Amino acid sequence: MKLLIVTGLSGAGKTQALRCLEDSGYFCVDNLPCEMLEGFLELCRKAAPPVERAAVVIDSREQVFRSNAEQVLNILDRLPIQYHILFLECRDEVLERRYNETRRRHPLSKDVRDGIRAERDMLSAFRDRADTIIDTTSLKPLELAAKLGMLFSDDETNTFRLIFESFGYKRGVPFEADMVLDMRFLPNPFYEPALRTLSGADEAVLEYMLQDPAFLSFLEQTETMLRLLIPGFRRQGKRRLLVAFGCTGGRHRSVCAAEQMAERMRPDFDVKLVHRDTTLEANDIRSRLGT
């Protein structure tokens, strides 16, 4: 059985995340007291058919039962199964705006700012132990759903998934990334008029990038590093590795690097490719037309 603990800041999207996970086949429970977790797992085991994937929200509301994060984590560590912690993060000013828009009261304080500060401190141990952190500051609901699907879609038990993601620094670094590689050391195709409207998935951009020997050297050394590290990650029980490539706008250099690394690693691993800041409309059209 897979158990996903969903936690994070109030207003960061836990309710939305739970709905997405439920749509993906998880049996979901919101605000389950940690003392009831073992009994909940037993019910899941006895169900007909048994529950194979469950997601449980545990957050600052545990204070009602006089439990703090460390006590909750100790209870989790005593469970008879392995679990994965998903922490939803968000910038303070965005959380404050969301509360002001919905006119909801923060669960820890009448003053939203005080509540956010108190909750960050209360949940810091959860954040430190989290296997995955998603920053929802700039994510729309559909983008969050896509991110959760990418990270927690069902797969075979022994499969190790490699996720290559491109992004632009102007929208921030993806918090959930296990590795972040900065491609801004390479010349920017954006300043080439013939390449500006293309993306890193276009052959012309790849040819331009390969003119710089540093790019090919980077790909070769990154592949060597990943093949060296992945066996160690697997021995530690890790089943997914998200490698993010960043450039200024997230359209040329980062996309090209992610595409090339995916191509290199796909023969030996379950590879997923994500371009966060570009939908590659032109390439999608060409693909559909067969051109």
Image (cartoon, rainbow, N blue to C red):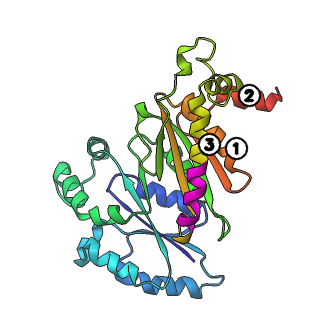
The magenta region covers 224-234
- The residue mark sitting in front, 2 or 3, is 3
Q: Residue furthest right?
A: 290
- What secondary structure is found at the residue carrying circle 1? helix
Residue at the image position 44 percent from the left and 83 percent from the top: 79
Q: Which residue is mark 2?
A: 285
Q: Position of residue 271 (x, y in %)?
A: 66, 52
Precedes in sequence: disc 2 or disc 1: 1
Mark 2 is surrounded, within 10 Å at the Cα level, by few (under 14), some (14 to 19) or many (20 or more) other residues, namely few
Q: Identify the amino acid type marked 2.
A: Ile
* Vertical comparison of 281 with 275: above or below: above
- The residue mark sitting in front, 3 or 1, is 3
The answer to whether residue 23 shows anywhere in this view is yes
Q: Identify the amino acid type marked 1.
A: Glu
Depth order, front residue of 120/195: 195
- The residue mark sitting in front, 2 or 1, is 1
Q: Which residue is mark 3?
A: 220
Residue at the image position 51 percent from the left and 31 percent from the top: 250
Q: Quadrant of the N terminus?
A: bottom right
Res 199 quadrant in image: top right
**Side of 166 where 64 appears, left or right:** left
Q: Identify the amino acid type marked 3.
A: Glu
Q: State yes or no: residue 48 in magenta.
A: no
Q: Which residue is mark 1?
A: 263
